[in-house]
Every structure is written in C-alpha cells, then in structure tokens.
Image (spheres, rainbow, N blue to C red):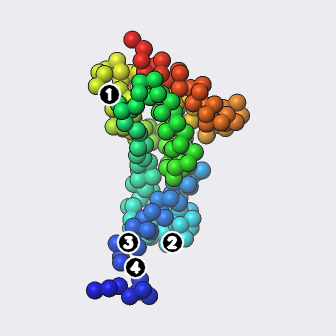
Amino acid sequence: MKQDIDSPPPVARRSDRTRAVILEAARRRFATHGFERTTIRAIAADADIDPSMVMRYYGNKAQLFDAALDINLHLPDLSVVAADERAATLVRHFLRIWEQDEANDALVLLLRSAVTNEQAAARMRAIFAAQVAPALAGPGGPKQVARAGLASALLLGLALTRYILCIPAVADLSPEQVVATLAPAIRVTLEQE
C-alpha cells in the first residue's frame, strides 16, 4: 500500500525527528548554559515544542543530559595505519570531529561539564574506557593504556585551549600546523618504552 504524498509521515519517523530536534536543542543549551542553568522549558522553546514533549521523550533533565552526552568518536582503526602515521591520523581525526562534525556541541558540552558535573565526568571516563583506550592502546596492556591516557590528555588540552578557551596562540593555528606540532608529541607518548 502506497502512502499518500499529502498524508503525514509515519509516527516512528516523526518521533525520531522530534527526539533529534530536542537532543540538538539540549546539547546547544547545555553547552552554552551548563546543566544547572538549563531548563526543560528553555530547551522546549529552542526546539519549538511543548515542554511536555521533552519529558515524554527523555523523562527528566538528568536523563536528557545523559542522552546529550552520548558520543561516538568513530575513531579510526589505527592498527591498519603505518606506525609513523598513526599520531598524525589521530590528530587529524580529532580536529575533524571538533571542527566539522555535528558532534561538536556534544563534545563542547562534555568537556565543559566534566570538570564540575560528576555525571559528565563519568561519561568522559566511560568514553575513554570504551572507545579511546582500545583504539590507542591496542593489545599493549596496562602500560599502553597509561600511554593512551597521556595521549588523550594532550588532545583534551588541545580541545580546552582551542575550542573552549579560544587561546589565540592555539585557536589561530591551521589544522595542518596543529598536526605538524602535536602529532610528534603524541607519537613519542604512545611509543615510549
């Protein structure tokens, strides 16, 4: 049975779109105003929907915040990259997700919030454990996980200075300048004996 062109879209597709609009508005609002100063009413206004719809789809502000912090970094498989290119590949990927991906609002939200909000800090640790450590450490054991943590510290420091604090000495660098300068430090960190 064909759907009439003038008929409304199926409910599942409409609800998916509504959830996505709410989540996008929440990420922007949380990233700008933080958890404490963000209200369900403000998110609903940003999404141009009734506040009850936010509650219907996400339950409460804490559950919406948790959903807003759900991030997949889509890290590349570094095991198939030549050893001398892994660090540069990682830095390029990191810059791309911060500068070009739609995940940017979520990343800003996560980084800003993780310092003062335990829920965000727990999410940051979970992302490291589930996505970053396995991608960077590989089968290298505890020493390599520690190195992956230190490489992450370098990348998070870059994110803080470039995207949150907007320090001109870092923010004004081209992506290739960042790669050329930071990749060698990450390479040394990951390969240190």
Q: Which residue is mark 4?
A: 9
Q: Marks 2 and 1: which is nearer the front?
A: 1
| Res 119 visible | no
Residue placed under numbered mark 2 in the picture: 49
Q: Position of residue 96 (x, y in %)?
A: 53, 43
Q: Residues within 10 Å of mark 1 (few under 14, many from 20)?
A: some
In this view of the protein, which residue sits in the foreground, 87 or 66? 87
Query: In the rendered structure, which amino acid carries the disc numbered 1?
Result: Gly
Is any part of residue 95 visible from this angle? Answer: yes
Residues at circles 4 and 3 in contact by the CB criterion of under 8 Å: yes
Q: Is residue 124 left or right of residue 36?
A: left
User: In this rendering, which labeled residue sits more in front, label 2 or label 4?
Assistant: 4
Q: Position of residue 2 (x, y in %)?
A: 32, 85
State how far apart marks 2 and 1 are (Cα): 45 Å
Q: Amino acid at mark 2?
A: Ile
Sooner in the amino-acid sequence: mark 4 or mark 1:
4
Residue behind mark 1: 138
Residue 85, position in %: x, y? 47, 28
Return the residue found at the far top: 193
Q: Are marks 3 and 2 in contact (CB under 8 Å)?
A: no
Q: Amino acid at mark 3?
A: Arg
Q: Nearer the viewer, mark 1 or mark 3?
A: 1
Residue, disc 3: 13
Q: Is residue 37 left or right of residue 170?
A: left
Residue at screen point 45% across, 63% down: 20
Name above or below for residue 1 compared with residue 162: below
**Residue 13 in which image quadrant:** bottom left
